[in-house]
Amino acid sequence: MRLTNTLSGQKEELVPRGDSVTLYVCGVTPYDDVHVGHAMSYIIFDALRRYLEHRGHKVRHVQNFTDIDDKMIARAAQRGVPVADLARHYIAAYFQDMDSLNIQRAHLYPLATEEVPHILELIGRLVQKGYAYQTPDGVYFRVQRSPEYGKLSHRTLEGMMAGARVKVDEAKEHPMDFALWKAAKPGEPSWESPWGPGRPGWHIECSAMATKYLGAPLDIHGGGPDLIFPHHENEIAQSEAVGAAPFARCWVHHGMLQISGEKMSKSLGNMVNVKELRRRFSADALRLFVLSSHYRSPLTFSDEGLVASERGAERLRHAAQPDGPAGFSRLDSASYEARFHEAMDDDLNTPQALAALFDLAREINARRAAGEPVDLGVGVLRALGSVLGMTFAPASAPEGDHRPDVSGFIALLVTTRTELRAAKQFAAADGIRDRLAELGVVLEDGPQGTSWKLKGIAE
RNA sequence: GGCGACGUAGCCAAGCGGUUAAGGCGGGGGUCUGCAAAACCCCUAUGCAGCGGUUCGAAUCCGCUCGUCGCCUCCA
């Protein structure tokens, strides 16, 4: 398949070298609940991984947790809890939320705090080779030693300095030099090192973990677009300085999630967290919302968009119901599969892949309505949908929905209503239906009798 | 100030020089139904921000104008 490589700005054919594809995705700093921006990011990389696996590649997927940094320390202090406890809590929350979105877990989730020896070794090599120097504040990377610095973000040191929004630190040789090791201030968690007690800088952990667990060059290194600079740029500088060049063959970045035209950020206070969203929308609706635009385009979050996606998800769910007779069908699912693959092969074009799925759903519905067996088509729809991470699970049982199971009572009312209808007492029958609708139970009369489902999710 | 992205139907969104401009949501009409819902069928952009240019041919390439947004600082 072809993927856009941020490094070249071009679509490039992904050619696996060994028996597997290595995928490193930058993870979160676990100091707060995950928000829709994270959801968007990890849904996209989940779809990428699932597709690679669908195409027969073995994927080795590593994603880190930055469990020690300024934000962690500040939040822990604010709450009066140890940093490690804060990390443990939000890492658990991260998994809960991502699981609820049907995002496959990475094979390994290294923690920065557990990689300190390896990080120190890497810093030592950088110092030894003249790429790093010590100041009273810690150890810094010497960006001017990297002639290619800026190659990922396509900018130059001069260009960045022109912006002049860089804080001046007298002790640094160059304003763009960045910390590899931060000297501990009193009361901060710290580790011993040849440069005094301190903790790792942000960027060094990813270089250390990625090379340790996957080895350079990585086939794919991904992350949010806001990580291109400085995080990923610095990862490249550090890693390639010690000979791990190229650090990654293909850099994959997606568009930014925005909220009503603005960037969503902690400072603007317009965060929407995943837990809250999952109470109102199904995992499939979130998937559809994210994947119905191309991953490299910015996406604007909106409630109306989610509502529309929930309807769309419901449409696919309906078509994917494995009912009806099995048997031969004239439905040509191969052509839909071909469209799906062609779209996904071309830089993960999920909107077009979804279009193929919706067209398949339409044909399934039409043939099912005509009494034809559609089990083969349904099988293909479910298989391809699951490549995108769709669950097809009924929307009626959202995560965190603690409504008691009332199906017995509803069944009783449905039976009663059926009897009323048989007796042509339509006013009473409609009354039951209306009252149930008010309570969030939708009845549908079909040839095989009356079925019901809970509405509730996207109300 | 530097770098970059985008502007396609009421809304979201594909399209990467050449058949009738995907798909979803919404809306309109119809079939089915006691009615409704769901489902199905049909319709919903002679036009792709505007103006020039290149080309036999442009939503797609180039230039300019207008508009929106992002990165350059912690952030997926």
Image: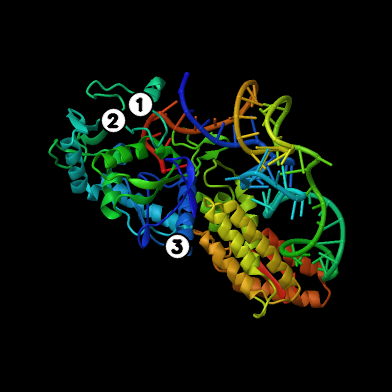
Q: Position of residue B16 (x, y in %)?
A: 61, 45
Q: Closer to the N terminus: mark 1 or mark 2? A: 2
Q: Are marks 3 and 2 on the same chain?
A: yes
Residue A234: name its quadrant: top left
Q: Residues within 10 Å of mark 1 (few under 14, many from 20)?
A: some
Give the answer, above or below, for where A72 lies relative to A429: above
Query: Pointer 1 indicates a residue of which chain?
Result: A
Type of the residue with mark 1: Leu
Residue for badge 3: A53
Give the answer, above or below, for where A358 lies relative to A72: below
Q: Are marks 1 and 2 on the same chain?
A: yes
Residue for badge 1: A157
* Nearer to us in this view, A265 or A344: A344
Q: Residues within 10 Å of mark 2 (few under 14, many from 20)?
A: many
Q: Is residue A129 left or right of residue A80?
A: left
Colour mode?
Answer: rainbow
Residue A231: name its quadrant: top left
Query: Pointer 2 indicates a residue of which chain?
Result: A
Type of the residue with mark 3: Glu
**Distance of label 3 from label 2 (alpha carbons):** 38 Å
Q: Position of residue A319 (x, y in %)?
A: 65, 66
- Residues under numbered marks 3 and 1 in contact, where contact means CB atoms less than 8 Å apart: no
- Residues under numbered marks 1 and 2 in contact, where contact means CB atoms less than 8 Å apart: yes
Identity of the residue drawn at 17% across and 40% down: A124
Identity of the residue drawn at 56% across and 51% down: A349
Q: Count numbered badges in the picture.
A: 3
Callout 1: helix, strand or loop? Answer: helix
Q: Mark on residue A143?
A: 2
